[in-house]
Amino acid sequence: MYALVEIQGRQYRVREGMHVTVERMAGIGDTVELNNVLLVAADGETKIGRPHVPGAKVTAALADHPRGPKLVIYKFRRRKNYRRKRGHRQSLTRLRIEKIEAGT
């Protein structure tokens, strides 16, 4: 069984027991219900939402808050003595998918 879920404007294909890394969400150890389920596939039957599957939901737990890889932003203009170097690390949240309910 798997589902297509929309989380913070992005779509993820999830299965029970898997981990999904999304942008930062508040809390840790909390349980989150994701109601924006776009598709549910189970036992050879596929339910496609228009735009969401009615009654379907995915339950996930906030596992931890890692940080993404370091990105270096380097701006340079030749012959103008212009150089700017900045770094960035995105704050992320790892969700553990616990349960997928297909709805009606």
Image: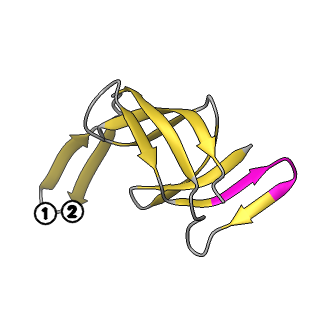
Q: Residue 16: percent from the left, percent from the top?
A: 64, 34
Q: Looking at the rendering, which quadrant does residue 97 occupy?
A: top right
The magenta segment: 39-45
Q: Residue at x 23, y 40 (%)?
A: 87
Viewer-closest of 20 and 87: 20
- Check disc 1 and report its element: helix, strand or loop: loop
Q: Is residue 69 visible?
A: no
The quadrant in which the N terminus is found is top right
Which numbered circle lies on residue 40? none
Q: How many marks?
A: 2
Location of residue 38 with respect to 5 vertically, above or below: below
Q: Are marks 1 and 2 in contact (CB under 8 Å)?
A: yes
Cα distance, mark 1 to mark 2?
A: 6 Å
Location of residue 11 with respect to 94 vertically, above or below: below
Residue identifier under label 1: 80
- Check disc 2 and report its element: helix, strand or loop: strand
Is 58 displayed left or right of 66 in the figure?
right
Viewer-closest of 80 and 100: 100
Q: Residue at x 31, y 41 (%)?
A: 24
Residue reaching furthest front?
104
Viewer-closest of 46 and 92: 46
Location of residue 57 with respect to 53 vertically, above or below: above
Q: Amino acid at mark 2?
A: Arg
Q: Looking at the rendering, which quadrant does residue 80 occupy?
A: bottom left
Q: Residue 56: percent from the left, percent from the top?
A: 58, 55
Is 46 displayed left or right of 75 in the figure?
right
Residue identifier under label 2: 77
Q: Residue at x 83, y 57 (%)?
A: 45
What sort of colour scheme is used for the picture? secondary structure
Q: Residue 2: percent from the left, percent from the top?
A: 70, 46
Is 40 displayed left or right of 92 in the figure?
right
The overriding secondary structure of the stretch rendered in magenta is strand
